[in-house]
Amino acid sequence: MAFRTKLFGITYDFKDVKEVLAKANEQKSGDEAAGVAAKSVAERIAAKTVLAEIPMWVLRAEPVVPYEDDEITRAIDDGLDLVAYEKIKNKTAGEMRAWILDEKTTSEDIAAISKGLTGEMAAAVAKLCSSLDLIVGGKKMPCVVHNVCTMGLPGRMGARLQPNHPTDDLDAIRAEIYDGLAFGIGDQVIGINPAIDQVENLMKMYDMMWDIKQKWNIPASNCILGHVTTQMECLKKGAKVGQVFQSIAGTQAALESFGVEVGMLDEANELAKKFCYSEGPNYMYFETGEGTELSAYANNDADQLTLEARKHALARRYSPIGVNSVVGFIGPEYLYNSDEIMRAGIEDHFCGKLLGIPLGLDNCYTNHVRADQNTNEFLMVLDAVAGCNYHMGVSMGDDVMLSYQCASYHDTASLWSAMGTRPAPEWEKWAEELGLLKNGKLTDKAGDPSFFLKR
């Protein structure tokens, strides 16, 4: 198949699918650093023109990392729902975009084919979408999951409560948890990034979170974002674990740089099903972010968005409770400014939902990026309109452990007010019984963490 087009008297010839995908991507500093980006707007448009005519079966046949060389490619391809794949294999990327956006196409129609798509297919469609297309399309793709609370229901928007501390001080973490609970957030998960990734340290934090859950009868799930092997050891020792976490990548080489392989994730998922205290059936929590593979020198000359979508397709193997795109965390080497961060956020959400996973967003940036808190708030609104499952919340919007800027606890409540959305039903019932919420809005008692110190 020739990957060629002529625009304004100039012929653009692309050597393979991987090059078409990369050059059809919107401008990203990471793709430019990797040498895979279009060299001009005209070349980008030419690549999009070619991409629009590529059938889904070609995108499956030519993954950006060959099947025989990469276990992630194999895990994705071997796990395809072939009945679903047969329904869409002859559609071009352009036809898939039009079909998704067609008002006659329902959420159920899209869900029926999502497990027949690879990451390359989802990324191809996203690259042909305007930002509004990504929002409209994302809104049509709800993904409802359950761990302790039911997440992703229409009209609901959850939050991960992230109470990090640079020395894992338990009293400080407890105070941050109470701060978040006072604002009514935490239905997705109370998730700590540990400074010290050791079994003994994690066991103490699990005990502390379980104590809070029991004392206040909270319908909360917990997670400590240590390495998956550390969490597995804690599970075996009887720790009260709600969700099991791991950062993942879109190539085998990048995943191995985390000290992880697919078989290890398989084992963790089985242990979670057996030992987690939560009801399930969704237990695994993954984090992703555009640029991971390039930072590990393992991008295989593929672009950031395509590799991000491959992570989503890998995550689908485990029916996760949440997949979190930490969209602006890595830095300006990969997403240079507010425009690139916001585009990446709604791309990631669209691809994840198209592949059938519960995508959430960590709307964030590091202090050396050309972005500010307005970037976070603008992106929160965009992905909330698009129907993302949850957002992140950090005390004061400043993560003092990971040294990056995020949404604050009260930002979620502001979005509930602006969007007319609410937390998960189980969580809302608990918060209303406690007097922190009423009719989906914060009460006068809310926002004061000392509420939790009075008994």
Image (spheres, grey):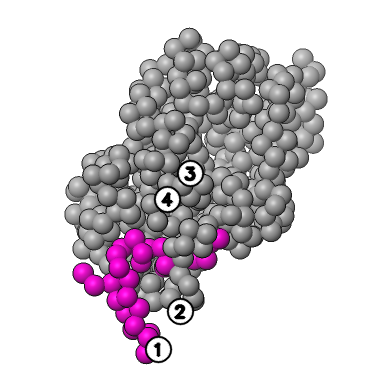
Q: Nearer the viewer, residue 282 or 439?
A: 282
Q: What distance separates the C-alpha of mark 2 from that of mark 1?
A: 9 Å
Query: Which residue shows up at 39% across the image and 24% down it?
Result: 268
Identify which amino acid the numbered label 1 is placed on: Phe
Identify which amino acid the numbered label 3 is placed on: Ala
Tell which circle, 2 or 3, labels the residue nearer the N-terminal end. 2
Write down the residue under mark 3.
Answer: 296
The magenta stretch is: 1-29
Question: Percent x, y for residue 359?
Answer: 48, 45
Tell which circle, 2 or 1, labels the residue nearer the N-terminal end. 1
Tell which circle, 4 or 1, labels the residue nearer the N-terminal end. 1
Name the residue at the bottom extreme.
9
Q: Nearer the viewer, residue 217 or 206?
A: 206
Write down the residue under mark 4.
Answer: 299
Query: Which residue shows up at 43% across the image and 41% down it?
Result: 254
Marks 4/3 in contact by CB < 8 Å: the verdict is: yes
Label disc, if present, on residue 8 of the rendered structure: 1
